[in-house]
């Protein structure tokens, strides 16, 4: 007997239904697989057995290899074994079909509302085919009021929902009774939630569900993740209190990590330009690669074109459609700011195969199954290995099928990143997600949510939240501060009744009794805080989507801009609605800019890039991408140096602008922003000097009118990590950055209310409110824990403090390669251009860059080994 068969026999002995019924149900499930033309994978059977054993765990498998059915069919098998035959199929039974379905057994948490419909279809299919009398429904922000009202009295057997909607359910006093028979919670795409405040919100919700149902099981699904063991611990909690009914000793549940099919074939290639400029700058290839991309799209039956920002999505959709006007109606675009009805139409077109191609952002990254898609394109660098793998999995989204992704570089150095990402992916070097700890703003919101619902005892809730990874180190003092804050507003706001949200009743229970506070809190539940958005709508009423208020503040009536793939003209802004009309072609029309488009190169991908450059320094150019940039890197080696893994390259030159210093730590743009400011500050403490700065993912530039004493500064601790917090606070606008970050913390903790639907506050109003609170706390309550959290988040999230510390430590041990330049090298050129871009208009900027490129190429063409005279 095999180990798998033995496991199945053990499970049968332990389940509360008979072994015969379990065996019958198992045959039904296997037969259903065969009817689909499938055979259950070993990891799927392993997951079913683990569920029936009462175990919790995490299923880790490549995209499109059957994770959903691995997590789902165990509870389906259990339901089939327990289901009793109806004695009658009368019309009365049919009318009361919903009442005859079991109460809620399964919660399926999805990180995106867009996934809910697709998940519903995947879960409902076997339920219907196997005639399992379960109701399967979703509850998200898109759910109609009719369905919501029906669910108010009775939730379905299986509920697909989001972390925010689950939190809303926990704010209802009767939710515990509705979840009395909860057997299983499945958290889909756990890697997307891990390391975010939504992940912390999910952890806290899971802790409450486990308290209500200690015997329930929790399973997570993850496709692409580096720190998989830690991910499982965060999901299940460091002290999982579950006890399992069918374990004879009633001991705590074990945790099971199940690895799925790992042999899925993925092809990564590139659209390599015919010619490579040896002096590239960010985005300079850009739309020049459009003809090659259009030709590749034409060859594919159905494709997705991923970009890294919503602005790029609008630009590339317009460019592709201009090249192929006959594709109107056959291609579309998809991003999170487009109206929900349009996104639904696009997603359905992908499922049915009626759309040839869709230009999209990460809005289509996750688990939606678009089986007809046979090719994926990535515009620009993926910035991370896991992101490339995730997007590749959108094609061939079925077990055994080939997934293919073709990368379209927007500058020559991105060819190096593409080759590096492929190497890292093949070696299994994926990024991990660092879990958050003690997010007190999220915990504050959660405490009020529970107080709005059934109320809580302070000691019980403290023990409950300490069973989460995020709050396991929560101190008694921190908890006491939160309780004081939600009941009295803390030291600074004690005199204001609006901040006395929670009361303590005669029994010592914390409750919210004020209906206005209850309503406002429910409207504010969630951890996603973005710039205030305005609805874009045609004068005659058709809704296009939402655009950020910060962009519209720069647009005047009569100005034109592209949105949702259309060229529109602003008529006026009325309250929170942007009224537009169709416009004629205008080359100068703007494209909206959304926040959050500056992803840094991940640590894993940056390391892989250094490996590629190390090989190039030794004359090794193995990949097609590396061969394409060989002349560029050989020129870099000739005019300067290609740094090895253990080297820190520092280039210097003098031009009419002043003295340039280029430093290349390869630590990502956020770290380089912090390092450039830190170095400028530390040098200026030794000599009176002022710097202009620029940075990218490879390094940063310091420009000064006089020569900086760099060697002396390094000898005197330029790379030291001591006093870094104080130095960073002095060298950046810490107050302004802290205020911006505090806006998020204040929103989540409920310090500000953004208004009722249809009457939302503007971004300026919200910023003014949070800015005032920031100043009040800083001046009168400096020990306010939310204030301290926002200051810490500036360091960790906006400057990647830990990565900065690691980079400084590495720089201290590297061999420094000093290279004087007589002309800008291929690596320094994009840094210089980045700084120049901030001072010139787009037209004069492009012209000037082109002239500089021509001058440098002319010098390089005369003698690749001869250094020329500085500009």
Image: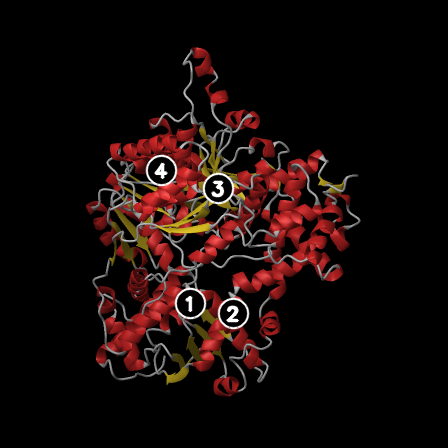
For the point 26% across and 34% down, which residue is it? 36
Circle nearer the N terminus (4, 3): 4
- Camera-nearest label, 4 or 1: 4
Instruction: Say which residue label 1 marks.
Output: 696
- Camera-nearest label, 3 or 1: 1
Q: Position of residue 322 (x, y in %)?
A: 28, 45
Circle nearer the N terminus (3, 2): 3
Q: Quadrant of the C terminus?
A: bottom left
Instruction: Say which residue label 3 marks.
Output: 546
- Camera-nearest label, 4 or 3: 4
Left or right: where does residue 217 sit relative to residue 320? right
Q: Position of residue 862 (x, y in %)?
A: 22, 80
Q: Position of residue 456 (x, y in %)?
A: 68, 42
Q: Which mark is residue 674?
A: 2
User: Between 692 and 409, which is closer to the camera in this rendering?
Assistant: 409
User: Between 473 and 7, which is closer to the camera in this rendering?
Assistant: 7
Q: Which mark is residue 827?
A: none
Work out how far the residue at label 4 is from the one at label 1, CA to CA, in angstroms: 35 Å
Q: Position of residue 571 (x, y in %)?
A: 49, 39
Q: Residues within 10 Å of mark 4 (few under 14, many from 20)?
A: many
| Placement of 393 over or under 863, stated as above or below | above
To which quarter of the image does residue 472 belong? bottom right
For the point 59% across and 33% down, which residue is it? 175
Instruction: Say which residue label 4 marks.
Output: 347
* Residue 590 appears in the figure: no
Circle nearer the N terminus (3, 1): 3
Task: Identify the secondary structure beneath mark 4.
Answer: helix
Q: Residues within 10 Å of mark 3 (few under 14, many from 20)?
A: many
| Placement of 355 over or under 316, stated as above or below | above
* CB contact under 8 Å: marks 3 and 1: no
């Amino acid at each position: 007997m095999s180990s798998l068969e033995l496991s199945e026999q053990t499970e049968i002995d332990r389940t509360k239904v008979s072994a015969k019924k379990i065996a019958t149900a198992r045959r039904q499930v296997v037969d259903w697989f065969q009817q689909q033309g499938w055979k259950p994978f070993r990891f799927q059977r392993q997951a079913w057995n683990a569920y029936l054993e009462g175990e919790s765990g995490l299923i880790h498998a490549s995209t499109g290899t059957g994770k959903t059915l691995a997590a789902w069919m165990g509870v389906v098998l259990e339901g089939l074994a327990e289901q009793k035959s109806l004695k009658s199929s009368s019309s009365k039974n049919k009318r009361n079909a919903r009442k005859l379905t079991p109460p809620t057994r399964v919660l399926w948490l999805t990180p995106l509302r867009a996934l809910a419909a697709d998940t519903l279809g995947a879960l409902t299919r076997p339920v219907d085919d196997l005639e399992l009398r379960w109701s399967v429904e979703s509850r998200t922000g898109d759910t109609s009021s009719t369905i919501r009202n029906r669910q108010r009295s009775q939730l379905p057997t299986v509920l697909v929902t989001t972390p925010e909607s689950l939190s809303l359910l926990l704010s209802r006093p009767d939710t515990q009774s509705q979840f009395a028979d909860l057997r299983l919670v499945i958290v889909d795409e756990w890697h997307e939630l891990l390391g975010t405040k939504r992940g912390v919100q999910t952890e806290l919700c899971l802790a409450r569900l486990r308290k209500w149902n200690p015997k329930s099981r929790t399973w997570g699904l993850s496709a692409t993740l580096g720190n998989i063991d830690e991910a499982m611990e965060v999901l299940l909690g460091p002290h999982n209190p579950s006890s399992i009914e069918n374990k004879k000793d009633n001991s705590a549940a074990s945790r099971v990590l199940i690895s799925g099919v790992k042999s899925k074939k993925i092809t990564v290639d590139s659209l390599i330009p015919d010619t490579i400029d040896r002096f590239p700058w960010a985005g300079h290839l850009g739309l020049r690669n459009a003809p090659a991309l259009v030709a590749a799209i034409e060859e594919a039956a159905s494709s997705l074109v991923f970009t890294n920002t919503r602005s790029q999505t609008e630009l590339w959709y317009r460019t592709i459609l201009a090249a192929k006007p006959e594709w109107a109606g056959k291609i579309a675009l998809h991003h999170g700011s487009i109206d929900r009805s349009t996104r639904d139409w696009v997603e359905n077109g992908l499922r049915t195969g009626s759309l040839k191609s869709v230009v999209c952002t990460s809005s289509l990254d996750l688990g939606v199954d678009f089986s007809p898609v046979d090719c994926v394109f990535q515009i620009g660098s993926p910035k991370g290995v896991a992101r490339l793998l995730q997007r590749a999995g959108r094609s061939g989204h079925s077990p055994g099928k080939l997934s293919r992704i073709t990368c379209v570089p927007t500058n020559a150095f991105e060819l190096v990143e593409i080759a590096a990402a492929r190497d890292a992916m093949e070696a299994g070097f994926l990024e991990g997600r660092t879990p958050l700890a003690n997010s007190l703003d999220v915990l504050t919101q959660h405490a009020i949510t529970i107080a709005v619902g059934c109320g809580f005892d302070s000691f019980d809730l403290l023990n409950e939240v300490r069973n989460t990874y995020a709050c396991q180190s929560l101190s008694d003092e921190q908890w006491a501060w939160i309780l004081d804050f939600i009941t009295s507003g803390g030291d600074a706001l004690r005199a204001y009744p609006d901040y006395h949200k929670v009361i303590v009743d005669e029994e010592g229970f914390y409750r919210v009794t004020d209906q206005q506070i209850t309503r406002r809190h429910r409207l504010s539940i969630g951890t996603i805080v973005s710039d205030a958005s305005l609805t874009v709508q045609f004068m005659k009423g058709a809704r296009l989507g939402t655009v950020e208020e910060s962009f519209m503040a720069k647009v005047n009536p009569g100005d034109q801009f592209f949105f949702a793939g259309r060229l529109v003209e602003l008529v006026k802004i009325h309250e929170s609605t942007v009224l537009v009309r169709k416009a004629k072609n205008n080359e100068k029309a703007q494209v909206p800019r959304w926040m959050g488009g500056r992803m840094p190169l991940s640590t894993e991908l940056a390391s892989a890039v250094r490996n590629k450059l190390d090989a190039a320094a030794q004359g090794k150019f193995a990949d097609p991408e590396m061969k394409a940039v060989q002349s560029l890197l050989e020129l870099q080696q000739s005019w300067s140096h290609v740094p090895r893994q253990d080297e820190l390259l520092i280039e210097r030159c003098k031009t009419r602008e002043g003295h340039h210093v280029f430093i290349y730590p390869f630590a990502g743009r956020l770290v380089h922003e912090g390092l450039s400011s830190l170095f400028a500050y530390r040098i200026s403490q030794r000599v009176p000097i002022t710097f202009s700065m620029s940075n990218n993912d490879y390094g940063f530039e310091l420009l000064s009118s006089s020569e900086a004493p760099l060697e002396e500064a390094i000898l005197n601790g330029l790379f030291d990590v001591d006093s870094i917090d104080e130095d960073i606070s002095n060298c950046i606008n810490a107050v302004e950055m802290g205020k911006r970050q505090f806006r998020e913390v204040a929103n989540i903790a409920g310090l500000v209310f953004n208004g009722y639907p249809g009457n939302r506050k503007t971004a300026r109003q919200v910023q003014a409110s949070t800015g005032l609170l920031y100043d009040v706390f800083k001046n009168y309550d400096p020990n306010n824990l939310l204030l301290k959290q926002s200051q810490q988040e500036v360091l960790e999230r906006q400057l990647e403090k830990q990565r900065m510390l690691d980079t400084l430590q590495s720089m201290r041990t590297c061999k420094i390669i000093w290279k004087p330049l007589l002309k800008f090298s291929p690596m320094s050129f994009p840094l210089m251009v980045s700084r120049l871009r901030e001072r010139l208009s787009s037209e004069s900027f492009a012209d000037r860059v082109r002239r500089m490129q021509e001058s440098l190429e002319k010098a390089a063409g005369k003698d690749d080994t001869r250094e020329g005279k500085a500009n």
